[in-house]
Image: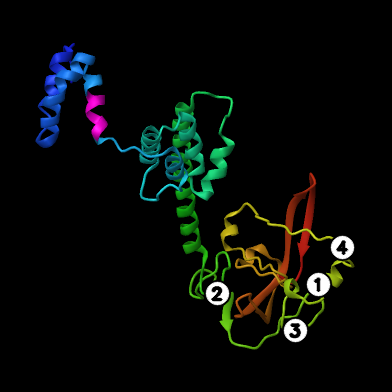
């Protein structure tokens, strides 16, 4: 009831009009005793709730509160659930705050615990702030997952997981084609055919003899980036989709095997110059036979 300063007697009468069945019978029988104790609506409602109240032990309440949040329950609903269980089991507001963090999903629990301020005593206020954080965290995570999904659909083609790859009849026709053949890859470490350097049996022995290597993830900052292919995982050859990335390009007729086992037919070869920053110094890497 709002919109006026209603007397307590009228408020209690309005509550009487909202009840029916056994609840109404019980209310009409007990309301004279309750109003004699305290003639307020709040007191009458609290006394009315006593026979319908579900009470549980503190240990059972803590077990329920610290159980992982149900996926079907929103964060607002979960917070209301925790406060209700705490009230029914006699747990404190501090238990509500702690249980909110402990019941969070594993991917979110650590982030919430790092934001838990043990010096604050406004436990429920801090709990509502963590609820808002959890909602925002999951919303951002959902957006990132959508973005990654769209990126994968746009970049993956039949030729393997090559950025800008795809069917032979799309952009750059004639530059690369799939052909059949046999295993020709050789290990970068030992030179044997049949495995890559990352799986080389003699990798541990040769590791101490080799000098440290730096793996670079390079972008040219141009529109040609979307057509650039870089084969890693011990590959001894680098391929590009766009001929414009090559310097002194010449015609050739060679075949190389991709990571997924497919043979790639290469018709152009040249040199690519990459620039990057290592330890605050510009480093220029020149790749030949690309």
192 or 256: which is nearer to us?
A: 192
Q: Residue at x 55, y 65 (%)?
A: 164
Q: CA distance from mark 1 to mark 4?
A: 13 Å
Q: CA distance from mark 1 to mark 2?
A: 29 Å
Q: Secondary structure at mark 3?
A: loop
Mark 3 or mark 2: which is in front?
3
Q: Residue at x 14, y 14 (%)?
A: 9
Q: CA distance from mark 3 to mark 4?
A: 23 Å
Chain-order first, disc 4 or disc 2: 2
Q: Residues within 10 Å of mark 3 (few under 14, many from 20)?
A: few
Q: Residue at x 87, y 63 (%)?
A: 211
Chain-order first, disc 3 or disc 2: 2
Q: Secondary structure at mark 4?
A: loop
Q: Residues within 10 Å of mark 2 (few under 14, many from 20)?
A: many
* Circle 2 residue: 159
Figure label count:
4
């Amino acid at each position: 009831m709002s919109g006026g300063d209603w007397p307590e007697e009228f408020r209690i009468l309005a509550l009487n009009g909202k009840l029916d069945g056994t609840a109404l019978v019980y209310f009409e029988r007990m309301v004279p005793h309750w109003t004699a104790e305290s003639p307020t609506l709040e007191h009458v409602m609290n006394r009315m709730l006593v026979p319908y109240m579900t009470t549980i032990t503190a240990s059972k309440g803590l077990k329920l509160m610290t159980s992982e949040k149900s996926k079907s329950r929103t964060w607002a609903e979960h917070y209301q659930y925790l406060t209700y269980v705490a009230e029914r089991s006699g747990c404190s507001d501090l238990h509500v705050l702690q249980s909110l963090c402990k019941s969070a999903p594993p991917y979110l629990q650590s982030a919430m615990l790092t934001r838990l301020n043990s010096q604050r005593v406004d436990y429920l206020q801090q709990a509502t702030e963590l609820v808002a954080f959890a909602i925002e965290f999951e919303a951002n995570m959902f957006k990132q997952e959508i973005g990654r999904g769209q990126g994968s659909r746009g970049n993956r083609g039949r030729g393997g997981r090559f950025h800008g790859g795809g069917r032979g009849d799309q952009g750059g026709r004639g530059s690369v084609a799939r052909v059949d053949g046999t295993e020709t890859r050789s290990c970068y470490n030992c030179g044997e055919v049949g495995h890559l350097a990352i799986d080389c049996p003699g990798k541990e022995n040769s590791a101490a003899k080799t000098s440290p290597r730096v793996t670079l993830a390079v972008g040219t900052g141009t529109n040609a980036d979307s057509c650039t292919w870089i084969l890693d995982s011990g590959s001894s050859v680098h391929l590009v989709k766009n001929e414009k990335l090559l310097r002194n390009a010449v015609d050739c007729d060679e075949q190389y095997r991709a990571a997924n086992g497919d043979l790639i037919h290469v018709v152009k070869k040249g040199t690519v110059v990459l620039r990057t920053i290592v330890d605050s110094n510009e480093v220029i890497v020149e790749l030949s036979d690309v």
